[in-house]
Image: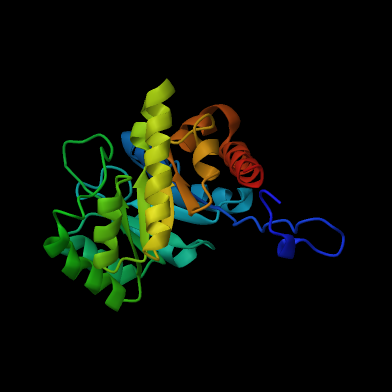
């Protein structure tokens, strides 16, 4: 038998179906806060967005507290940590200030990301290889505080290996280049993501992915069995203008589920 061993076939003469590993959706609400901050005041409220996301099928909430507080603010993190019914993933730079914030609010997870004040959005993955000495005490402090640590890295096996040496629990693969590419270049970037996800599994790391994903790019990434969570924000907040946040999240959730089940 070419693909299925004889001892895998049951009494009915059919091979058992393989269990499909579930995939989670983390919804990033940063840009709800961006809209609020454009005019000041309290509307729209990121906490309300988090509650809608929970009702629409999100598995977690992600929020990036930047050094300049350009969108999410300290009070948002305080409220999210206390009041939302989903795990909170705090995206943060590897600084003493952000470690102190994380330890004060104890989110479910902290994802360490590169951060430059002048960038509009995160432009690439963290250099875990070149920054091991700087990152080691940050990872250790967060873990000592009972916080699950993730590193946001480019889909590169060397970066995955560095994350393992740092004893992170999770790597989140940067999907921005894949989303921006076309044709053969996009296929090549997807292959890089797939290889890095396999490397994460070999190192015993949980694998997430995110950045720039939309309705037309999410399916192929969600189909990679080793990836167990996607974090998506800007696209969903943008689509909420046209569809409503609930409908946008439900549609994304359906795309992810279909891609996972059809692999």
Q: Residue furthest top?
A: 183
Rendered view: 175 above or below 114:
above
Residue at the right extreme? 12
Q: Residue furthest front?
A: 1
Residue displayed at 56% across by 39% down: 245
Q: Is residue 62 visible?
A: no
User: Residue 188 in the image: x percent, y percent?
Assistant: 38, 32
**Image height of 103 relative to 26, above or below:** below
Q: Residue at x 16, y 41 (%)?
A: 117
Quadrant location, the C terminus: top right
Depth check, front residue: 238 or 229: 229
Corner quadrant of residue 129: bottom left
Image-based side of 15 in relation to 60, left or right: right
Q: Camera-side residue: 24 or 157?
A: 157
Residue depicted at x 22% and y 48%: 114
Residue 24: horizontal and vertical position, in percent? Answer: 54, 54
Q: How is the image coloured?
A: rainbow
- The quarter holding residue 176 reads top left
Disc count in the image?
Answer: 0
Residue at 17% from the left image edge and 43% from the top image edge: 116
Return the x and y of residue 75 as percentages of the image width and height.
33, 58
In this view of the protein, which residue sits in the foreground, 254 or 235?
Answer: 254
Q: Position of residue 127 (x, y in %)?
A: 20, 50
Residue 6 in view here: yes
């Amino acid at each position: 038998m070419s693909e299925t061993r004889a001892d895998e076939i049951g009494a009915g003469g059919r091979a058992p179906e393989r269990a499909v590993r579930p995939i989670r959706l983390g919804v990033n609400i940063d840009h709800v806060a961006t809209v609020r901050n454009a005019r000041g005041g309290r509307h729209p409220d990121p906490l309300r967005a988090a509650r809608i996301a929970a009702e629409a099928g999100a598995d977690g909430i992600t929020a990036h507290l930047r050094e300049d507080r350009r969108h999410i603010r300290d009070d948002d993190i305080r409220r999210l940590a206390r009041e939302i019914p989903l795990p909170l993933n705090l995206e943060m730079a590897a600084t003493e200030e952000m470690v102190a914030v994380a330890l004060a609010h104890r989110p479910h997870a902290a994802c360490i990301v590169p951060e430059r004040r002048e960038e509009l959005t995160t432009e690439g993955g963290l250099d875990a290889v070149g920054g091991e000495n700087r990152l080691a005490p940050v990872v250790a402090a967060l873990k000592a505080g009972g916080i699950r640590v993730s590193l946001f890295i480019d889909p590169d096996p060397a970066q995955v290996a560095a994350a393992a040496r740092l004893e992170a629990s999770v790597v989140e693969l940067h999907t921005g280049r894949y989303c921006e590419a076309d044709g053969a270049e996009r296929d090549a970037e997807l292959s890089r993501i797939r290889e890095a996800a396999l490397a994460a599994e070999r190192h015993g790391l949980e694998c997430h992915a995110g950045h720039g994903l939309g309705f037309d790019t999410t399916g192929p990434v969600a189909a990679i069995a080793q990836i167990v969570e996607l974090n998506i924000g800007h696209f969903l907040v943008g689509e909420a203008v046209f569809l409503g946040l609930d409908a946008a999240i439900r549609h994304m959730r359906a795309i992810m589920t279909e891609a996972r089940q059809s692999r």
